Image: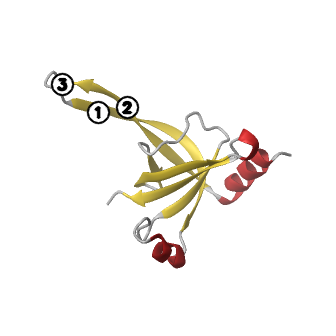
Amino acid sequence: MGLKQIASRLIKQHGQAATLLRPGEGTDDGYGNVIPGPDAPHPVTLLSATYATELQLIAGGFLDVGDQRVLVSVEGLTVEPATTDKLLIDGTEFEVRRVAPLSPAGEVIFWEMQVRDDD
């Protein structure tokens, strides 16, 4: 069993279902403004945890209290996560602040994201 399969199995076993919301294609209103289209939902499996207080202090403003570190399984993922996306977790919408793949040897094992409550 490879690292990707192990990571996907552990995230599925200890994580939860959520939805990645990708902004829909915008349309021009004829006055130079773009009207955003509806978000396209993409189901994901993720494992979430808050950052340690020490990291919040060290980051010096990079992290806010309540930011979450989210590990997203690649299993069943149909899009590459981006900072323009949002995550819907247990009915709460989070903005994606940072996204990076864990990809040793060029194979993405899982996606690590920093998300923040939209409120």
Q: Earlier in the sequence, mark 1 or mark 2?
A: 2
Residue hosting label 3: 29
Amino acid on which the number 3 mark rests in the picture: Asp
Alpha-carbon neighbours of circle 1 within 10 Å: few (<14), some, or many (≥20)?
few
- The one of 78 and 60 positioned closer to us in this rendering: 60
In three-dimensional space, the C-alpha distance between marks 3 and 1, rounded to whole angstroms, equals: 10 Å
The CA distance from mark 3 to mark 2 is 15 Å
Where residue 85 appears, as percent x and y from the top left, is 43, 43
Q: Which residue is mark 1?
A: 36
At numbered mark 3, what does the secondary structure look like: helix, strand or loop?
loop
Give the x, y percent position of residue 88: 45, 50
- Image quarter in which the C terminus is found: bottom left
Q: Which mark is residue 24?
A: 2
Return the x and y of residue 99 as percentages of the image width and height: 52, 49
Q: What residue lies at 83% left-to-right and 45% top-to-bottom?
A: 2
Crowding around mark 2 (Cα neighbors within 10 Å: few <14, some 14 to 19, many 20+) is: few
Badge 1 vs badge 2, beta-carbon distance below 8 Å: yes
Q: Is residue 44 left or right of residue 35?
A: right
Does label 3 or label 1 sit earlier along the sequence? Answer: 3
> In the rendered image of this protein, does residue 85 appear above or below residue 31?
below
Q: Is residue 33 above or below residue 91?
A: above
Q: Secondary structure at mark 1?
A: strand
Say which amino acid is labelled 2.
Gly
Residue 113, how many percent across, how many down? 53, 53
Q: Which kind of residue does numbered mark 1 sit on?
A: Pro
Q: 106 or 72: which is nearer to us?
A: 106
Q: How many marks?
A: 3
Label 2 SS? strand
Residue at 41 percent across and 68 percent down: it is 64
